[in-house]
Amino acid sequence: MKRIGKCLIAGLATLYFVADALFSLVSRPLSAWLERRHIFNRFRAWLRTLNPYTSLAIFLVPVLLLEPVKPLAAYLAATHHVVAAAFLFGIGEILKLVLVERLFAVCRYKLLTIPAFASAYGKYTRAKELIASTAAYRSVKYWTISIRRAVRSALPAPRTARHGDPLAKA
């Protein structure tokens, strides 16, 4: 019985990491785009003035607010509102990942000074490395890169901004 429980937990953790990886395909470019915008400079500067535990509290806010979206989406799916459930789950997960990634990027070094956080982050990193070392993960990664290259080569090249080009607005 104990072995079945461990297998179930490992399976759920794997599903969670796979879903996180899929959503990160959207959240990472969005997060990078936000990083290039300077609208959050004052917020970033304020975050850097906080102590580690206050940074942790702020880091947990998007998780605590957006994690309940998953059970709500499951409820909607169970009540035959599948499109609304998929939309809610997708938007909630992407928003959570973007906010958590941006906050972690700003507060990383402060958060890692908290022993419990550093330990949990170390375990998370090791779990990701373990999954990334599997043959299944490497196969999916290979096919993802192949598909991405095929799509990019099939699409027309993006227009470059030229002087006097009406589409080239700063």
Image (tube, helix red, strand yellow):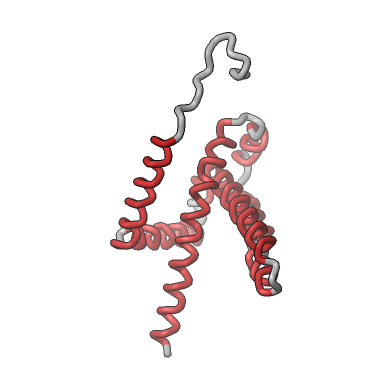
Q: Is residue 125 visible?
A: yes
Q: Position of residue 11 (x, y in %)?
A: 43, 73
19 or 85: which is nearer to us? 85
Q: Is residue 53 visible?
A: no
- In the picture, measured across the screen, residue 95 lies left or right of residue 148, that is right
Residue at image coords 65%, 35%: 40
Q: Position of residue 109 (x, y in %)?
A: 49, 45
Question: In the displayed structure, would residue 41 be above or below residue 24?
Answer: above
- In the picture, measured across the screen, residue 19 lies left or right of residue 144, that is right
Residue at image coords 61%, 48%: 99
Quarter that holds the C terminus: top right
Extreme-bottom residue of the structure: 1
Quarter that holds the N terminus: bottom left
Residue at image coords 46%, 76%: 9
Residue at image coords 52%, 43%: 105
Q: Quadrant of residue 34?
A: top right
- In the picture, measured across the screen, residue 102 lies left or right of residue 5, that is right
1 or 30: which is nearer to us? 30
How many labels, in total?
A: 0
Q: Quadrant of residue 83?
A: bottom right
Question: In the displayed structure, would residue 2 be above or below residue 115?
Answer: below
63 or 53: which is nearer to us? 63
Q: Position of residue 35 (x, y in %)?
A: 56, 35
Q: Position of residue 36 (x, y in %)?
A: 56, 31
